[in-house]
Amino acid sequence: MIGIVVRQLLFAGVATVVTRALMRHRKRRSERKHADSRLDDSLQDSFPASDAPATQDYDIPVNRR
């Protein structure tokens, strides 16, 4: 009986860790796509100028919140 409960708790813990890792991965991928899109837009807006596009993101990085 106790073994079943322990297995269920262990499974729930593993499922929680995996779910959170997948959510972080999706968020990073979404942020990367957004940054790439902004860079592409700024490159398009600056063409055919000779200077590089200005891409400044003033948002606080995730690890500093």
Image (cartoon, helix red, strand yellow):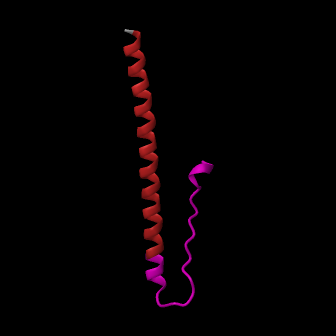
Above/below status of 18 relative to 45: above
Total numbered labels? 0
Task: Judge from the rendering whether residue 52 lies leftward or rightward of residue 14; answer left or right.
Answer: right
Image quarter (top left, top right, bottom left or bottom right) of the N terminus: top left
* Residue appearing at x 41%, y 10% in the figure: 2
* Corner quadrant of residue 37: bottom left
* Residue appearing at x 43%, y 17% in the figure: 6
Task: Judge from the rendering whether residue 19 lies leftward or rightward of residue 46; answer left or right.
Answer: left
| First to last magenta residue range | 41-65
* Corner quadrant of residue 44: bottom left
Does 29 appear in magenta? no
Q: Position of residue 17 (x, y in %)?
A: 46, 36
From the image, give the main secondary structure of the stretch colored magenta. Answer: loop
Q: Position of residue 57 (x, y in %)?
A: 56, 65
Does 57 appear in magenta? yes
Above/below status of 52 relative to 62: below
Q: Position of residue 28 (x, y in %)?
A: 47, 54
Towards the viewer: 45 or 10: 10
Q: Position of residue 18 (x, y in %)?
A: 42, 38
